[in-house]
Amino acid sequence: MGEPKSISKHSRIQHEIVSACNDLGIKAIQEFTGNGWRADVFIPDINIPIAFEIQLSQQSLNKTLERQSKYIKDGILGCWLFQKPIPKLIEERPDLPVFFVDEKEEAKLIVSLADRRHVILHEFLESFIKGKIRFNKRAITKRTQHIKLVFLEMECWKCHEMNHIYYVDNPFYSACNVEIQPDEAMWESNSIAYHPEIVALAESIVKNTNHINLKLGPIKKRYSNTIQQSYTSFGCCKCDSIFGDWYIMEAVIDSRYEPNPLTFVGDIELHEDVILNIPHWCYPDNHKFCDD
């Protein structure tokens, strides 16, 4: 007798969908044919029927949307499990639940939601069927944020005292791990570095690292001769001269090309939510969706 043939990835995924349905006590039908469509696995007896499509070969966006429209017409939620990226699919969209399946170590099938989350296929399937994954038009920051602050030396242009400034070296995150980078503009006091929670963290780091002798001047509004108005800024700890945003930006850009030993991490509690319009399929750890 010859060795048994290995099961194809398509069949493995298909069997995993059926297994997840069995664990949930839900009926699943393989290779179900409907009105102009054929689902790899069809789940009929739930509030909104789900058709799972396993697409391991390349398929264009137009073809995918054409096939998806048949499910939408019949009131069915079509969920697509792709192996390769879909050309021209620039952002996630509510009418097209698309997720990507990959095989990791120990032959585990893993589903990725962009770069936000990677989860075992079985867990993903149960969560999707139970409505724990849904589309959100916006992303909202979770309350606790893990922050990385990088301190840089800056000589005062006026009195030549050596000071330190800092910048935030990571974005905020939503509960489902969407990166949220608040809008910033020079000379408008809206830099992430000037958020009260960030300032408090920086001041705490300065206070608790006496051996390094970080010198951080007060962060407050100062008048700028360059733009003829006041804005929140870094300033000299000795003479209180303003450190202009343009020079701060140049210093930060230059520092990114080499490692900086003055890097610290800490957790903060945001006083206000940061909300950005970032369409995404939301799969939070704490079951609180971005649009709740």
Image (cartoon, rainbow, N blue to C red):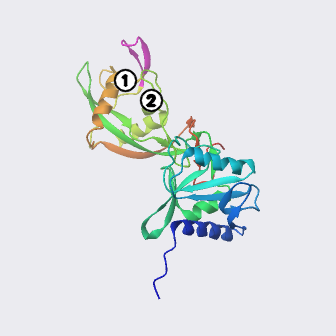
Q: Residue at x 75, y 50 (%)?
A: 75
Q: Answer with the quarter of the image where residue 242 lies.
A: top left
Q: Residues within 10 Å of mark 2 (few under 14, many from 20)?
A: some
- In terms of depth relative to the viewer, which is nearer, 222 or 229? 229
* Residue 241 colored in magenta in the image: no
Q: Answer with the quarter of the image where residue 10 lies.
A: bottom right
Q: Residue type at mark 1?
A: Asp
Q: Answer whether labels 2 and 1 touch (C-beta < 8 Å).
A: yes
**Magenta residues (range):** 220-231
Q: Residue at x 28, y 36 (%)?
A: 255
Q: Residue at x 71, y 54 (%)?
A: 36
Classify residue 96 as left or right of residue 2.
Answer: right
Q: Residue type at mark 2?
A: Ser
For residue 13, above or below residue 247: below
Q: Residues within 10 Å of mark 1 (few under 14, many from 20)?
A: many
For residue 234, above or below residue 167: above
- Give me the disc on residue 191: 2
Whether residue 164 is visible: no
- In terms of depth relative to the viewer, which is nearer, 287 or 40? 40
Q: CA distance from mark 2 to mark 1?
A: 10 Å
Classify residue 164 as left or right of residue 179.
Answer: left
- In terms of depth relative to the viewer, which is nearer, 218 or 288? 288
Q: What SS does tag 2 mark? A: loop
The residue at which mark 1 appears reads as 245
Count of numbered tags: 2
Q: Quadrant of the C terminus?
A: top right
Q: Position of residue 118 (x, y in %)?
A: 50, 57
